[in-house]
Amino acid sequence: MEKDVTQPASAESTEQAVQAENTAENTAAPSEKGGAPEGGAPKKKSLKWLWITLAVLIAAGIAAWCIVCALKVEEGSGVEAAFNVSEVIALLTGMFIVAFLGYMLGRITIKGVSLGTAGVFLVAILFGYLCTLPWLKNVPIFDVFYMENTESTLNGYFEDIVQNIGLILFVAAVGFIAGPSFFKNLRKNAKSYVLLGLIIIISGGVIAALFTIIPGITPEFSAGILSGALTTTPGFSAAKEAAAENLRNSVTLGHAIAYPFGVVGVVLFVQLMPKFLKADMNKERTLLSAGKQELRVKREGLLVGDSFGLTPFSLAVICGIALGSITIPLTGAGYDGACFSLGNTGGVLIMCLIFGHFGRIGKLSLEVPEKTIKSFREFGLMLFLIGAGVSGGVSLVSEIGKSELGGWIVLYGFIAGVLMTVIPMFIGFFIAKKWLKISLLNNLGSITGGMTSTPALGTLINVAGTDDVASAYAATYPIALVSVVLVSQFLVILL
């Protein structure tokens, strides 16, 4: 009997619970569909459109007020008053316009080959050229983008600030990437890297000397072409310093003409050679890392400045800039004659290699997280290409306008630049492959270092699928840097 009494009570409770649940669902249903319970708050959709309408009205009111005030300003300056666009804003806007369009262009792939980040460089050259068009200075707002010549302030921002910051960030990242395995790799292949660096630069110098035989091609112009074909700023500076005052424009013109293909040519080379050779990239990556020891060990008890590694990164850059600023006289004239320095690029690269290799100073950790290094590498490369491209486009237009030979000098310079880019690459590549027996990825890495091509290294890392190629670049680059400075000066002084 006790059991019979309990069961009906349980059934009744269950029925009441189901009814309560259905009632709760029916109450919540209108709210889920965007409505509201009777007597509750207004619908959310209605509130959303109310706020949107209010925001549009406020924006329209502000715009109308600005237009009214602009109409009261003196003729021709109302638009500029409404849009306060300074040269700094023009710099930032131009940078990111070039970056957006450049990366979009670089994504275009034809038969597996793309420009990659070199697309940023080509768009930057076009941007620099467009900014020299005379009609631009008469258009409100856009007149702030106008650059009459290389002496323009905005061009100086791109050339001196954007380009150098980008270059320092990139080579510093490469130094930290290559540092752990650099000295081991250098001990193993030191003779090969030194030889390749010398062969590439000397073969380019021989071609440059041969072009001076052509009537109208001066040694200064030819040295400028060589520095442009090898995309080397230190070589360009060395040639200008060695040239007479009235012939320095010839160095600048040659550099400006040859520089675009100097960038694009090496970028395409490191993409096309593996395809032509039908290389097995998995096998090549295995050969590259064969015998490589994991040198990054976890170090406990060290002082870590910050979790992003900006402390050791900054310290390495400071030391590198200090090292690069040391100037060594090369002649008996002392500092009044030809001099040599590693510059920001060489100095920062060497110091970051050392920091990356040792990983600590006493209790201070010098390690930089991989994510930070890769971010700086890509961002630095982007800034470098933007700065070099925009200033290159402005320089090309400016220097061609000064030349008496006009279009012919461009044709001569372009042909010479192509030869000075392509021939040294092929010579170095086949000597490394057939004679020195260097693996493909190490070979291409040393080619980018021998050609002092920063953009090509960025492309090669993507093609190879590993950062390890940076070690060969870092080993060959210093040899090539010193060699190209000396060859550029010898071309001007001796010919």
Image (tube, grey):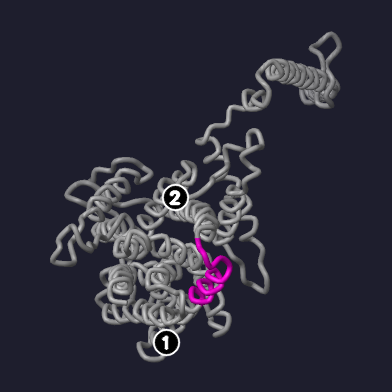
Tell me if mark 1 has few (under 14), some (14-19) or many (20+) residues whose alpha carbon lies within 10 angstroms of its own: some
Q: Is residue 276 left or right of residue 241?
A: right
**Amino acid at pointer 2:** Glu
Q: Nearer the viewer, residue 423 or 57?
A: 423
Residue at the spot of label 1: 433
| Image quarter (top left, top right, bottom left or bottom right) of the N terminus | top right
Q: Position of residue 277 (x, y in %)?
A: 54, 85
Rendered image: mark on residue 170: none
Label 2 SS = helix
Helix, strand or loop at label 1? It is helix
Q: Which numbered marker is on residue 159?
A: 2
- Majority secondary structure of magenta residues: helix
109 to 14, vertically: above or below: below
Q: Quadrant of the C terminus?
A: bottom left
Separation (CA) of disc 1 from disc 2:
37 Å
Residue 185 visible? The answer is no
The relative height of residue 494 versus residue 337 in the rendered view (above or below) is below
